[in-house]
Every structure is written in C-alpha cells, then in structure tokens.
Amino acid sequence: MFKYLLLPAALLALSLACSSGSEPAAKPLVAATGITYTDPVSTGWRLVKDPASTPTRLLLNLVGPSGLKTRGVGFNLQLPANLKAGNFTESGFPIRDLGVYELFNSDPYPYDGSVVPGSDPLEPKLLAGGMKAGNLLTVGIFQKDRRLSAKDSGVPLCQIALETASLSGLNAGDPLKGLVITKARYVAEDVGAFDVAPTAEMARKARMVDATVALGTLTAR
Amino acid sequence: MTFERSRRLPTLVFALALGAATAWAGTSPRFPAPAQIAFHRSQQTLRAGLAQDHLQARRASLGLGSLEGFRTAAVSTNALGEAIVRLDHTFDGHRVLGSQAVARVPLGGAVEASTDAVLKGVALSGQPLLTPATATAIALRHLAPRGPMEATPRVEQVVFPASFLGGPATVTDPVTGKASLDRHRTVHARMASPYVWAFEVRTRLANKVDGRKELTYHIDARTGAILRVVDEVRHQAVPATATGRGQYSGTVEIPSARMADGTYALYDPTRGTQPNPTLQSFTPDESGWSATGLQTWYEQNDAQGNNTWMSYLFQGNATNAWGDGLPFTAYGDEGGPNGQTMGVDAMHGMAWTWDFFQNVLGRAGMDGKGTSVFAQVGCTGTYSRENAAWSNWDQGMALGTGTPGGPGAFTDFDVIAHEMTHGVTGSTVGFLNTAGFEEAGLDEGTSDFFAQMAKAYAAAGDPYASTLPASGADWTIGAGVFNGTPLRWMNKPSLDLRSPDAWYHGIHYLDGHYSSGVLNRALYYLANGAPADASHPAYSPFLPQGMTGIGYEKTARIWYMAVSEILVSGGSGQLTFLHAREAARRAALYLYGEGSTGWGWDSPASRAVENAFGAVNVGLNYGEAPRTQVRFADFRNADWIERHHADSALGGSRQYFPMGERVRPMAQVLNNANTAVTWTVGGRSLFNGAEQMVHKGGVINADGTWTTPTDLGWFALTATSVADPRQSAEGRAFIVNLDADSDLEQDAVDMGALSYSWYLTNALNPAHSVFNAPWVDDGDVATFTDAVLATWWVR
C-alpha cells in the first residue's frame, strides 16, 4: 500500500520540475475512469489485448508461439487490487474458448452411441476458471481427448476479462502494477504412449510443460 | 399342441346333426342342455370309432409303421357335447407305454386329434422270452407279500420305452422327517435298446400284515429285469390343526398337515393353492408333500451355529404337538422341540397374515395369485442370524435364529407380517428399497403398517372376519425379538435415535428402515389421531391442534388401495412421500369421498389424510398456508453427467468442493423472507449403520463458511432454517482432490493433468483423477469444473 501512495506523489514532483515560466501550467490531474493495456513485445506466450475491449473491461487473449502445437494451456494471473476478473456468460467461468482447441470427445459417448460428438453443449469440458484468495485468477483450457490433433498455438487460444474494481486514488496515466503470471503450463503435442507401468519417458511426456507468458503494461486512463 | 382336423363327415352323423340342430335352436350353441348331453353320450362309441379311423388313416403322416395303430383306451363326453377319445398307440397289437393320442369329435364328426405324445420310431427286436406267469412271479418276489393278496395280479404285454425306465426313488423317514433313498423302489436296470418288450404287472395288497399297497411293475420280457416300480396309491397331505408352543405367540393352535405316513408336518395345504416358485424345484415324494400351501422349514446348522446350507420341512411329528416355547439355543437340532418353537411362531404369523390380507383386503396371498409362501427359520450367517428377509424370487422368508443372550429368533408376529407385506408390495407398487430413494421408506413403512393391522386382526381372534377391529395394534415393531424394547416406534419414530419424526429434504439418504418413520407416523395419525398436548410423545409440532383418526379399517383400506392400485414405482425409485400422500388422498376420496360438496372432492377422510401427512411435514395440513422449506442445492441438476451416468446409491442433492478450502455450501429457503440457514456438519444419515458411506468433517466457521476436510469422499451437511428451525435439509458434499498435477496447489491448471488420462482405463497416472481412481472420465471433468465453480467463483 505504501508503494502505491508514493507513486502519484513522485509523478507530481517530476511534473513540477519540468515546468517553466513560459510553458502552460501542468495538466490538472484527472481521476482514472478506466484502464488501457499495451501489448508486450514478444513472439512467445503472451497476453494481448482484444479489440473488443472497453475502458472498464479489458479482454486479453492468450497467444502462443507460432508453430508450437499444443493441446491446452492454463495459467494463474495475479491481479492488482484495482482489478477483478469478469465472467463470460457462455462458459460460466472467467475464461472464453476461442474455438481453436477441440474440447469435446471425438467419439460418440461410449455408453450412448446416439450422441454425436460435440453436439451436446452440456458435455463436460476442461474449460474452467475462478478467483482464488488473494485476487488470483486461475484459468485453464485443455482438450480432454488425446486422440484429437494438437493445435498451432500462434493464434488467440482463449480469452480472459479484467474489469475495474476500484480506481479510487488513481489518475489517468498512472501505471497499474501487480499484474503477474505466477504459473503457466501447457500440454505438448506429444503426450507419449501409456501403460499401466509407465517408463520414465512416458512419465515425462505425461507432465505439462512450464511456459513463460509475457504481459503488457497496464495504465489508468 | 398339434391338431389336425378330419374332413370326413359320415352321413349318419351329419343327419343326426341336422335334426339336432333344428331341435336345439334357441339354446346356447356352446353348452348343450343335459338332455342333449345324453344324446351326445349315446354317440360316444360311434365317435370313438371315427377317431380311431381318423388316426389309423394318418399313421403314415405320423411316421408310424405298418405294425402300428391306435386303439381306444377311454372315451367321454365333455360339457360341449364333444366326444373326447384317448387312444393308445399300439405296436403289433400291444400298447406302447405312455404313447397316446387325444381326439376331439364334435357333432358332425370333424375329428381334431392331438398327437404330440405319440412316440415315433418304435422298433423292437425279437419276441418275449418270458411268459406272463414268469413276469408275475418276478413282481411278486419283489413285492414280497406277507399276507394274502387281495386280488390276482393283472398282466399285460406292452412296449416299454427307455424314457420310462425307473431310477432312484425317495422316501420320507417318519422319525427324522428327512428324505432318503427308497431302496425297495429304486431301479438300476439297463435296457438293450430304446424300446423293449415288457410285461406290466399290476399288484394290489390289502391285509393287516402288509397294509395297503398298489405297486405296478414293468418287467423286461426278455431279461426279467425290473424296469420300473410305481406306487399307484395317491398320497395326499390332510389338513390338521396342531398345538404349538411359541416363544412369542404362546400356546396356540396352528395349521398343519397329516402326511401319508400318518405323521404331521408344519405344512398348511389350505392356504396357497399355487405352487411356490422355489419349492416346486423339489420333486414331491410319496409323503403327501407338494409345493403348495404355507410351509415352515428350518435351516440345519451345526452345533456352533454355522450354516450347513441344508433345509428341511418341519415334519415327522407323531403327536402334532410342536415346540417348547423357549428361546432358541439348540443349534444343530433345529428340527427338535426347541427349534420347532421358531416354526410355531412363524406358522402362527403366516396364517394370520395370510387370512388378514385375504379376508379383509380380498388379496389371495402375497402375490394376489394364491402362490404358496414359506418361512425358513433358524437362519444364521453374518447377515441372516439377526435379521429377517423376504425374497420375491422365492416367495418366502429367511428368519434368523437371533443370538443367545441377545436378540431372540426373528419369528415374532410383526416380523413375519412385515416380511409377508413385502410380498404384497413386491407384486404391486414394486418399491425400490435402497438408501438414496424416498420410496425405500415407503416400502418399509408399508410393511410396518400392515404388520400392525395383521397383528390387530389376529388379536381379535376371528380368522374369518372380513373387517378389522378398532384396536389391537401396539404400533411398535420387533419388541418381542429385542426383549421388550421395540426396534421401531410408529407413534414417535425418533425414539430409536435414528428415525425422523417428520420429512425433511434429504431424507432419502436414510436407510428405508429409518425413513419409514415418516410413513409410519402418518398412518398412525390417520388411524388413531394426533394429540394436541405438546407433552404427549406423539405430538407433532406441524399439527399442534391435533386431529381425530379415522380408525384401522379405513386407514388399512386407503393405504392398501394406494399401494395396490394407485402408486407405481416398478423399482424405479421415482416415488416420494409426497406421492404417497397424494395416493392416500385419492384413495380416501374414492373409498370414503362423501363430503359437503358432493362425492370425491373433499371429505372428512381426505382431510384426515392431509392432516396426517401434514403432521409429518409431507405437504400441508388441510387449509394451511405454505410452509417454510429448506432445500440443499444440487450442483448437478439435470446436467450431462446426470443424463449419461447411472445415478449412485447416494444420488440426489450434491455439491462438490476441493479439499482443505474455505467454501460456501448452498441451500435455498422457500416461502420465507428470512433465507438464513445455520450449517452443521453431519446429518441423520450418518446413522445408517454398517453400510455407511458418508462422513462428518471439516469446520463450520463463524461467517458460515465451511473449511472442507482434507479427505476425499462424501460428507454430510445439514442446513437449518433460522426463521423456522423445524425445517432443515441434509445434503452431500463430495470432497475431491483437484491437485491432479501434484504441484501441491489446486487450481485450473490441474485440468491439464486430467487431459492426459481421460478415458484411459489403468492410465498413466491414477493421481490425475480427482477421485484418485485408476481412470479419468467425464465424471472427473464435470466434478472438477463443478468444484471450481463452487469454490472460486467470480464475485
């Protein structure tokens, strides 16, 4: 808390120092009413802003390295106190499927051959997320059927929504710090074979791969 | 059956038919008058000749050779005026044993013949080497009469098919009552070919020394071997009345039977005229026993009380006095006087219960078809010793011995009547009796209730009464077995510290023997009324003003109609106590529907039903405003898993949470502005007993949240309305481990681990399952997402 109080004061000091007698007076401070997000400069895993974002609801798409085929990804995102996660009506969770991964069973359901794959919107899918204690957003999207092909990750794979909670004390232009990826993992294309007595190689391939997700910068507006 | 119709119409018969038809015009064409029957009888010989001609003409089509033919064996005229002709199949003029055709010859002479029993392919080699006199001598040597023959044996040369060859014969030992090999009548002969020449020798003995015997022998006409010995005397058990000393029933008269050997059995041939499906697998011997009637059997144990899996009818009693009236202790001698005591109580209860259902409710036996019922007393084993069970498959009961020093034998009246009522509901409404369904309580409650009605019927003492007395039930179950302390109290079920006095949401988790308390109390109220005195044990806070009962008779008829004519389960588990209330109300309006607004709309009886069920929180009292209700929320209401997976025995309202997290269980409060609830861990269903599958754990925090346990499994939670503490709901929380990737954190990233193993039985990593199961399927997927949604929802 001390850090955030100090920051506006420092900006104010800089502003005063740069002024001169012939220059117009510094712009008056304007209380923040929304947020802006500047995409990171990265070709790896990254969260990029979706054009449909609004000043109070920031939509971030997760994009992976082009050419890397994966079967799903999940991450935990620490949010600043000023922000909260938003839900998506269609999923009921704070994560939206952007249609890249195939989330349904590839076969008719084994106990009931009458079900056409993917036809039942209520079929359980590995798409979920929520807010853990400490304003930690956790989300994941994964294919459940290992018989389906892996997908190129260089496109928007899923989307999250960050909404303003309380911007009091923030002025337009103030940076919002504290947006941190604390964990990110994906399922690689090669999930290996399986056996009741797995080899070390099988066990290694049955573990998710850690990913580093680049974040842009958040600024109050 | 194969019938072939003759096209021949003899002129004479046709002429008679025309005349007769004219004369009989105006009478029933199906059943002629007696005088006309006399005419038909006069035509019997003629028609028998027609039948014989018909079959003789069909020999080739029947596969018979030139030496074969038919000979009239018997002819009669049936009620339709048709001649029924039995014809023996003959070979070279001799009868082929057991090979017959039956012909029907109506007016007009069109013969219909059934030839299914005509043996094909009869072939014999050679001619008899024995004379009839030699065969008779062989038979008499076997018969070994000690006194004079009453009549000269009758001898006939016949063709003997191998299918009639005798084998082991059994006889009942009059002392032990056990079946043993009858060496005298057992035949060990072999035949040279499928058909042989034989002499049939019929013998008859009737003198003081030998008694009465009628044995028929078949002697191989070439070897002299005895091929078959048949006792021609038709034995039959004769109904008798026994004196019994029961542990619970005291000294009583009970039905029994005098068997062929003059001894007696706990076998009532007068009740249950259709064979019992299990008993009919036993072949009747010559004792007079058959698979019909009420029967009391005993399990044979060893001296330590271990089951030997052998059962016997109580029989071989020379005096027809049974039992010693003492608690059972004589393991290994279940057929003796001490074991008979259990049989006395069982037969006493069976007969009265049978008569109650038949005479009062018009039901022929448990299944409504008059099928024989048996009781098997003296059962032991971990489950059976201190229990009683009805089997619809067997149409019979298994009744435990109890344990010396503990519960007595499970043969008390209300136990017997309770179990037999399961036979009634098993063949009518078909309740599913499994914890997880409310109708388990309906099943057990129905058995408890009719046990009371049968008890009252028996107490009145008139086995022919068609109505119930006004009193006589004690409204408890199992007091005798448990040394005076009832197993269940119907007027206040909670006295057993297990059963609820009233319905609540989640009662279906209870075993039916406990959830039955709701129906038991409702029917108690309906019959007896409810007190308005709050200090009375039967007082209901849901009906503080009390009510007047409508009596045993009306209550029994209403509830019998509900279960036998209105309610339908079919073993589906779909019925609830609310369905029971509505069925009882409908029955009340149907049977006793007279009210101020006319018939069938509203009557004192239907109001009494509403109040009786309202008093146990099933629906509202007559005219009452909606009550506060509490519902435990169900996370999986009608979702994909519900529709595609078979429900579990612990089905119903469920919520899913991760282990060791602070969560908010959810409950709804209806019909009250104050929706606050008080949460407690656990619930009534924790008391279900040995089959317990639910636990109590975690901590309810001051803010109403629940810190979940760190163990996987089902945990019971109870929510009680703050505004109306009478109303509560019990639900199930399933605690799962979401840390599928084993990084010691439960989060959405864990779902990736599930994806590796989905639908791979015995897959790579069992820990991927949120249930720690050796596979991962949509149950894990749905549960994972349900738990995430319930725990870390976006506020």
Image (spheres, rainbow, N blue to C red):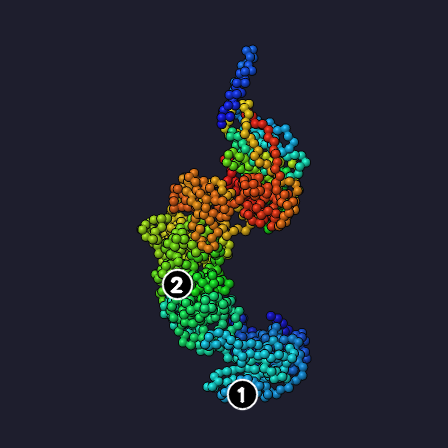
Neighbor class of circle 1 (other Cα within 10 Å; few <14, some 14-19, many 20+) is few
- Judge from the rendering whether residue B278 lies leftward or rightward of residue B100; answer left or right: left
**Residue B308 locus on image (x, y percent):** 49, 67
Numbered disc total:
2
Q: Which numbered mark, 1 or 2, is in the foreground of this view?
A: 2
Residue sitting at x 47%, y 86%: B209
Q: Helix, strand, or loop for circle 1?
A: loop
Circle 2: residue type: Gly
Q: Nearer the viewer, residue B49 or B789?
A: B789
- Which quarter of the image is occupied by the N terminus of chain B? bottom right
Q: Is residue A107 above or below residue B115?
A: above
Q: Is residue B703 above or below residue B198?
A: above
Q: Nearer the viewer, residue B580 or B452?
A: B452
Find residue B405 and name its label.
2
Q: Is residue B666 above or below residue B103?
A: above
Residue sitting at x 52%, y 70%: B282
Circle 1: residue type: Thr
Q: Quadrant of residue A60?
A: top right
Name the residue that disc number 1 marks: B152
Q: Is residue B674 visible?
A: yes
**Residue B74 locus on image (x, y percent):** 56, 79
**Residue B231 locus on image (x, y percent):** 53, 79
Q: Is residue B423 visible?
A: no
Q: Nearer the viewer, residue B575 or B85?
A: B575
Q: Helix, strand, or loop for circle 2?
A: loop
Host chain of mark 2: B
**Residue B5 locus on image (x, y percent):** 62, 72
Question: Farthest residue toward the front?
Answer: A200
Residue sitting at x 52%, y 74%: B79
